[in-house]
Amino acid sequence: MTRSAAALAACWCCHSWWGGAGLGAVAFRWLIVTATRLLSGQADYTSAPGGPHPLLPGLGRWFVVLAPVVAGLLYGPLVQRFAREARGHGVPEVMYAVARRGGRIRARVAVVKALASAVCIGGGGSVGREGPIVQIGSALGSTVGRWVRLPESRLSLLVAAGAAGGISATFNTPVAGVFFAMELILGDFAVESFGAVVLASVTAGAIGRAILGDHPFLSLPTFRVDSPVEYLLYALLGLLGALVGVGFSRILYLVEDLCDRLWRGPEWLRPAAGGVLLGGLLLVLPQMYGVGYPVLGAAVAGRYAVVFLLVLLLGKMLATSLTIGIGGSGGVFAPSLFIGAMLGAAFGAAAHTLLPQFTGPAGAYALVGMGAVFAGAARVPITAVVIMFELTGEYSIVLPLMVAIALAAGLSRLISADTIYTRKLRRRGIDLDRAAPGPLDRATVATAMGPLPVPVDSATALPELAARLAGGASALPVVDPAGELRGVVLAREIEAALRDGADDVTAASLARTVPAVHPDDTLDEALARMIRHGSALPVADRGTGGIVGWLTHRQILNAVTVPNQRSGPTAAAPPRPAVIDEPARG
């Protein structure tokens, strides 16, 4: 396909299909409202938090403990069986698909992500809808592009156009949708890309407005800057926003790591089991249920005391981190806005108490805090300014917003090498800033992996384990009586158990859960995970989850240093698919 023909095909796809992105965004919002009504009895539970479910009056407000569990039982198996990349907040997967996979995203991701995220949010998951709609729109764009056989460069452009269309239709922000796609997904502002992304955003936005109406994100009173002194206060708020945004990112992945270490059951059951903890948090703070836009609006309107605002700030950090950590599906943009609103409102209220003659209402500080925390977490200052202006429709706050966001993004860069999106990828060994790929980037796991070693049963005693590893292997897979993989046992842990004289030790007590790699992952990604977990790793089929091979340090070294000597995918999958940690989660 020639360059001009590819450009025409891309523009045709954007124009003719991204009406579908607008309709998809509308459908996704309908799914969220429907799931929320079913699981909470209200279109948005946080508009009147703490009440009973109309169909379960006997439970009173205790139904919020049950709602996340029921939701987890629905979306947990769905994600595990059909599209594991639909787990989490979605945007990093799209960034990776554009930067490393030529824009290829499976079509089923759009359906699975929409259903899983809607049920997760409807069941109390304290996450947003922007991550899911970005992944949904991008998957649709990738599917259409591959259907018309676009080259990779155009396919990536269509993925970004899908993200822009989804953001535009979901939030009624066509300009912000363009900048989100250009600044975060593509990472450039080329004129050629700009035209296609704008076309997609406008088309989807027009359809969204026709169906959902044309109104701003929040209904706001008029704000103004009462004194030049306030610019200094807004600058200070921007610096605080950077600290809070970076802190939110680190807490998110800290909780996720903790959940990884503690959970030892099947992954499909993890959201339901973790839903008990999330439900307990919702029982204490029902304002954390779902996205929480009514609570955010009340904070901007100045209806909460400073102490309660800070409680809501910390509660949202924990609730969102827990939702993602237990395997939930949803975005982190809306939680960033929520956290920023609580920070800004508390800061504004305190400033007005100390300097009443120089400060305006706390709501203005809440709006600026929203942009500052998002800029500190995601480090996309242009998008942050534009999206806050479009979400609120409040022009008078633009100058303070620009000051705070510029400082927030700058300080975030100084104190953190990663953003809330790139941190997930870097934890998987993926550096999107790396220019020229090396040998490990060019080779895939399929070229290096070997057959799965004969597994050991979880009840295998220590002497037999030592005998199995005497041949020089560094790790062995461990299976349960049903034949499902439960982890690996390391030679060094067996040596330590022998030194301690622990005769009652079995493979089950020594086994550790490790992530699987996929045959199409690069060896660079696989090596990073291998180093992080200190173990050989199983290789799982991306579609079924069944184990198809085994990867060790020695095999990676052979694949890189002896290009003609490959140990291909000769192993057969075990009788049943193994239940393993999904590596795409970070």
Image (cartoon, rainbow, N blue to C red):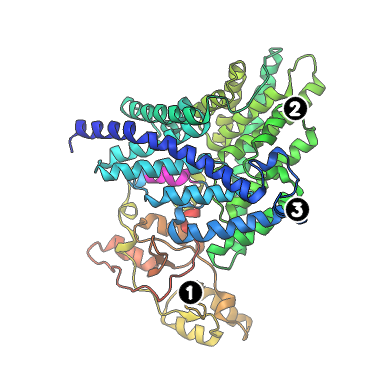
Which structural element holds mark 1? loop
504 with respect to 443 (left or right): right
| 15 lies above or below 255 | above
Disc 2 residue crowd, few under 14, some 14–19, many 20+, Cα 10 Å: some
Q: Give the range drawn in magenta.
A: 90-97
| Amino acid at pointer 1 | Glu
Q: Earlier in the sequence, mark 2 or mark 3?
A: 3
Disc 1 residue crowd, few under 14, some 14–19, many 20+, Cα 10 Å: some
Tell me how far mark 3 sits from mark 1, CA to CA: 41 Å
Label the magenta part by its dominant secondary structure: helix
Which structural element holds mark 2? loop
Q: Disc 2 designates what residue?
A: 302
Which structural element holds mark 3? helix
Q: Disc 1 designates what residue?
A: 484
Q: Which of 554 and 197 is in front in this view?
A: 197
Name the mark on residue 316.
none
The mark closer to the camera, 3 or 1, is 3
Residue 125: percent from left, percent from top: 62, 49
In this rendering, does residue 277 appear at all?
Answer: yes
Q: Answer with the quarter of the image where residue 293 lies.
A: top right
In this rendering, does residue 418 appear at all?
Answer: no
Residue for point 50% across, 32% down: 380
Name the mark on residue 57.
3
26 with respect to 355 (left or right): left
Residue 443 within the magenta-colored segment of the rendering: no
Q: In which quarter of the image is the N terminus?
A: top left
Residue 398: percent from left, percent from top: 58, 19
Residue for point 54% across, 69% down: 512
| 74 lies above or below 211 | below
Residue 34: percent from left, percent from top: 57, 45
Tell me how far mark 2 sits from mark 1, CA to CA: 54 Å
